[in-house]
């Protein structure tokens, strides 16, 4: 469809004003009729240039994998293969789940000329997305008309959990700045439960580390050097029920849990352990523990499109599934967000899994609970709310205490505290040699 531009509309407005003047001043008609005919002729000729589809080549450059809730760049290269200069307004069609900035873009292209336009997208949800094409608004040579053309240009991308945090962690690990993420360095040389090597005894070390056979052979004190056990398995158990839909600072508890899982998976893979994944309550998926070099990528591909549901999570059914799927002893990290009505089932789940596995339960807490505790009480309503909160927190504390008495590791943390908390817990378990 060809549309008139503002300049075109303004020109016709001037001619209409002259036409009205000709009604009162007949001499003005001698000038108005030729002027109107000339403008009409130029407008028709100018419109003919818009009827022909322009010879353009478009190439979009976008990463196949994008992190959620992070700005990412998209580039669009346009080449004018025609014989005339074109004035374009470019708008790349994006999915409604993407926030877009730096669009639309205006550009002028001479014949044979190319230009690369860039804009940024901010995916708000994970999943598989397709860029279908580009809308181009092309100005006629005299700028009297504007024609909209659609150029199909399909590109596919997957929006993953924020894997850039893994790269940030890798950079910190390289520079030995793990404390910036709240991760403690617990392992020391010579500690652990798996034999690593023999070395010369150092003064002050425990006599239990001395290898007396090697000492007799070499006729000097020789110590055993240990390291944390490798080739263990870590299985992440993620609740995708309605509780995990809670949103804080623009991110749901589910998204923040997925980011934490990626971080711990990276750490476990660096430690030589295999990582697996099981989700329940909404999307139900199972990835058996694997130790291959691409284990973190396999985890990404498994859980990138997981969504939370509006249903209540069935902890007991998940327990039965896990006991059937994972028979080898492993570390199970359960991430959930429970309420009082869930506590009995969650406790039963943790106890049954604890009979065979090492279990960590990370029960996420909303930030607003801490905010209410810090808010001064200024009236009766605030006092009632404060008392109800204390009762609720007391129930959570009782649940966590029962789990600890059953030998279950527990974490009562906010979602933003989860990454460092679960990594520290994993390192503590590895250092203690209980896995």
Image: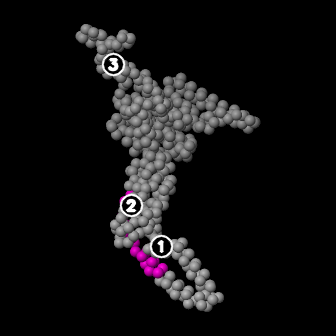
Where does label 2 land, which residue? 115
Q: CA distance from mark 1 to mark 2?
A: 21 Å
Q: Residue at x 48, y 56 (%)?
A: 102
Whether residue 434 is visible, yes or no, is no
First along the sequence among labels 3 and 2: 2
* Residue 217 in the image, given as x and y percentages of width and height: 24, 10
48 or 275, nearer to the observer: 48
Query: Helix, strand, or loop for circle 3?
Result: strand
Q: Is residue 347 positioned above or below 96 on the image?
A: above
Where does label 1 land, which residue? 143
First along the sequence among labels 1 and 2: 2
- Decide: marks 3, 1 in contact (CB < 8 A)? no
Q: Residue at x 38, y 50 (%)?
A: 64
Where does label 3 land, which residue? 225
Q: Residue at x 50, y 49 (%)?
A: 124
Left or right of 217, for residue 274: right
Residue numbers of the magenta segment: 42-60
Name the image quarter holding the C terminus.
top left
């Amino acid at each position: 469809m060809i549309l008139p531009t503002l300049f075109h509309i303004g020109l016709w407005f001037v001619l209409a004003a002259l036409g009205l003047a000709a009604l009162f001043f007949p001499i003005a008609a001698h000038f108005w009729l030729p002027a109107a005919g000339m403008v009409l002729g130029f407008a028709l000729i100018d419109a003919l240039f818009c009827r022909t589809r322009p010879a353009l080549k478009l190439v979009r450059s976008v990463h196949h994998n994008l992190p959620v809730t992070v700005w990412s760049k998209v580039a669009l290269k346009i080449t004018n293969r025609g014989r005339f200069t074109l004035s374009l307004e470019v708008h790349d069609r994006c999915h409604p789940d993407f926030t877009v900035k730096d669009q639309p873009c205006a550009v002028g292209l001479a014949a044979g000329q190319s230009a690369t336009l860039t804009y940024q997208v901010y995916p708000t949800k994970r999943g598989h997305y397709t860029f279908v094409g580009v809308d181009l608004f092309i100005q006629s040579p005299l700028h009297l008309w504007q024609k909209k053309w659609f150029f199909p240009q399909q590109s596919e991308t997957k929006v993953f959990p924020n894997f850039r945090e893994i790269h940030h962690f890798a950079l910190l690990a390289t520079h030995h700045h793990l404390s910036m993420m709240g991760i403690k360095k617990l392992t020391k040389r010579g500690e652990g439960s798996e034999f690593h090597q023999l070395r010369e005894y150092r003064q002050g070390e425990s006599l239990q580390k001395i290898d007396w056979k090697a000492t007799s052979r070499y006729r000097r004190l020789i110590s055993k050097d240990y390291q944390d056990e490798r080739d263990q398995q870590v299985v992440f158990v993620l609740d995708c029920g309605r509780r995990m839909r809670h949103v804080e600072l623009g991110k749901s508890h589910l998204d923040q849990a997925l980011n934490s899982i990626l971080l711990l998976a990276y750490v476990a893979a660096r430690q030589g352990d295999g990582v697996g994944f099981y989700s329940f309550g909404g999307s139900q998926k199972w990835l058996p523990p694997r130790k291959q070099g691409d284990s973190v990528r396999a985890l990404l591909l498994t859980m990138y499109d997981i969504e939370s549901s509006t249903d209540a999570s069935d902890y007991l059914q998940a327990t039965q599934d896990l006991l059937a799927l994972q028979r080898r002893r492993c570390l199970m990290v359960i991430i959930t967000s429970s309420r009082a009505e869930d506590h009995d089932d969650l406790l039963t789940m943790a106890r049954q899994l604890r009979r065979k596995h090492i279990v960590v339960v990370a029960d996420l807490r909303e930030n607003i609970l801490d905010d209410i505790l810090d808010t001064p009480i200024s009236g009766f309503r605030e006092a009632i709310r404060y008392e109800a909160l204390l009762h609720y927190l007391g129930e959570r504390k009782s649940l966590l205490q029962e789990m600890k008495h059953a030998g279950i590791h527990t974490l009562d943390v906010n979602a933003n505290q989860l990454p460092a908390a679960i990594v520290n817990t994993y390192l503590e378990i590895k250092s203690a040699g209980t896995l």
